[in-house]
């Protein structure tokens, strides 16, 4: 197999795997709070305690994946264009 064909096959495989992941699980853990929904801080003794609520995920701990966001946006544009 030529290197170009191998690269295309690898990119196609990665794309199909990511699209199936977005279809099966459209939400992932928030990258800012690691899925906790709040920041972890420490008290004066060094013990971990709950900090402020995460503003990025609105304290849910979940975020929508980029591929799912693009899919939703494309469907919305298609629906509005065919009305």
Image: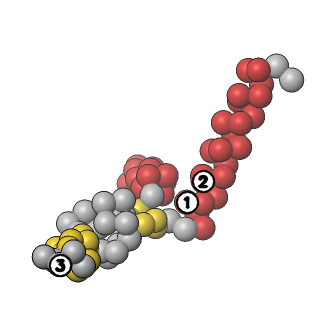
* Viewer-closest of 49 and 55: 49
Image depth: mark 3 or mark 2 in front? 3
Q: Is residue 28 left or right of residue 51?
A: right
- Which residue does the numbered mark 1 point to in the structure image? 22
Q: Which quarter shows the N terminus?
A: top right
Residues under labels 1 and 3: Cα distance?
Answer: 42 Å
> Against 41, is 32 above or below?
above
Q: Which quarter shows the C terminus?
A: bottom left
Q: Residue at x 77, y 25 (%)?
A: 5
Q: Is residue 83 left or right of residue 44?
A: right
Q: Residue at x 55, y 68 (%)?
A: 25
- Residue 78: image location, x then y, percent: 45, 51
Q: Residue at x 45, y 58 (%)?
A: 65
Which label is found at residue 19?
2
Q: Secondary structure at mark 1?
A: helix
Q: Residue at x 50, y 65 (%)?
A: 26
Cβ atoms at labels 1 and 3 below 8 Å apart: no
């Amino acid at each position: 197999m030529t290197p170009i064909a191998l690269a295309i096959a690898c990119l196609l495989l990665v794309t199909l795997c990511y699209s199936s992941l977005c279809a099966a699980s459209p939400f992932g853990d928030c990258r800012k709070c690691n899925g906790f929904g709040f920041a972890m801080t420490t008290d004066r003794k060094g013990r971990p305690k709950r900090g402020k609520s995460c503003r990025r995920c609105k304290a849910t701990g979940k975020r929508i994946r980029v591929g799912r966001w693009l899919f939703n946006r494309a469907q919305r544009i298609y629906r509005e264009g065919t009305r």
